[in-house]
Image (cartoon, coloured by chain):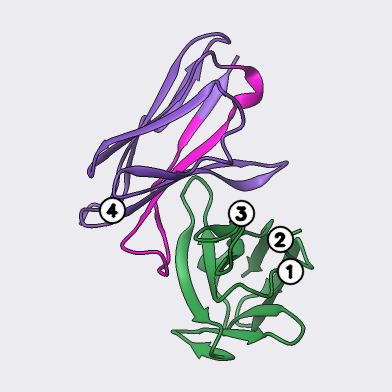
Chain colours: A purple, B green
């Protein structure tokens, strides 16, 4: 299995632009998670899905952030409009069930200038 | 609040020594704990896990200890190698109602540096 695949690996964008991060979970994993990692706040859970349905989005910082999972093999995290404080590494992770360790992707390093 | 914290943000050891990384958690309802290793430029990688009905679990060169009485978790790495240098995170899984249910919450991490 190729693991959790995220794209792009790096993204540099200007403030105000729309950014879309992509994730392909491991086949057969019913749970998908989006995390954000910064030096100041560590790893923060933004949102997670179960069977493509958003279960908890309480970690999404603002309305500028949105996430979708149109099918079991694809999810997006969108920021519109982006701001410099959104600069971070965004990780996607998936899990076969609730009580199991997550497998993380390699992350997308986002820089908003 | 419900949080996971680490006592030591950095740990430096000599190659061949044993390393111990500690973690305190605050949610007594958590029933599942995981240690992750994160190398530079990579995502967190699963190392070992333990459920709340156990107090010790061993893997290859790693041992996790759980003390539910004092809500403490530790990761022991035997014969530490330079390749073990990374940031180590403990994470807890909430099992009660409320905001932590069904979610893995990470501690701040400990930087382990292994000197040859």
Q: Residue at x 68, y 62 (%)?
A: B110
Is-magenta flag for residue A105? yes
Labels 1 and 2: the sequence-earlier one: 2
Q: Quadrant of residue A96?
A: bottom left
Q: Are marks 1 and 3 on the same chain?
A: yes
Query: Within 10 angstroms of label 3, few (less than 14), some, or many (20 or more) residues?
Result: few
In the picture of the structure, the residue carrying the numbered disc 2 is B2
Labels 1 and 3: the sequence-earlier one: 1
Instruction: Give the image location of residue B76, x and y in percent.
Output: 61, 82
Q: Chain of mark 2?
A: B
Labels 2 and 3: the sequence-earlier one: 2
Instruction: Please state if A110 lies on the left or on the right of B19 as rendered.
Output: left
Q: In what element is the residue under mark 1?
A: loop
Instruction: Give the image location of residue A54, x and y in percent.
Output: 40, 42
Instruction: Give the image location of residue B20, x and y in percent.
Output: 68, 79
Instruction: Give the image location of residue B109, x and y in percent.
Output: 66, 59
Query: Within 10 angstroms of label 4, few (less than 14), some, or many (20 or more) residues?
Result: some
In the rendering, which numbered label is found on residue B99?
3
Give, as a single range, the part of the protein colored magenta: A83-109
Marks 1 and 2 close (CB-CB < 8 Å): yes
Instruction: Please state if B56 lies on the left or on the right of B42 as rendered.
Output: right
In the rendering, which numbered label is found on residue A3?
4
């Amino acid at each position: 299995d190729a693991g959790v695949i995220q794209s792009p690996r790096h993204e540099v964008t200007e403030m105000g632009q729309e950014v879309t991060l992509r994730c392909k979970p491991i086949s057969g994993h019913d749970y998908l998670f989006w995390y954000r990692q910064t030096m100041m706040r560590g790893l923060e859970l933004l949102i997670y899905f179960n069977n493509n349905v958003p279960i908890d989005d309480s970690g999404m910082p603002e309305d500028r952030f949105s996430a979708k999972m149109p099918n079991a093999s694809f999810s997006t995290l969108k920021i519109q409009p982006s701001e410099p404080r959104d600069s971070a590494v965004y990780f996607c992770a998936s899990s076969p069930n609730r009580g199991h360790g997550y497998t993380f992707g390699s992350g997308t390093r986002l820089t908003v200038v | 609040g419900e949080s996971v914290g680490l006592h030591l943000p950095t740990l430096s050891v000599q190659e061949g020594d044993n390393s111990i990384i500690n973690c305190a958690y605050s949610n007594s309802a958590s029933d599942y704990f995981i240690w992750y290793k994160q190398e530079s430029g990579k995502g967190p990688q699963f190392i070992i896990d333990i459920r709340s009905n156990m107090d010790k679990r061993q893997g290859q060169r790693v041992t996790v200890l759980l003390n539910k009485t004092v809500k403490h978790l530790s990761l022991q790495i035997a014969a530490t190698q330079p390749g073990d240098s990374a940031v180590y995170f403990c994470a807890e899984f909430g099992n009660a109602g409320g905001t932590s249910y069904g979610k893995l919450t990470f501690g701040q991490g400990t930087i382990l540096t292994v000197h040859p």
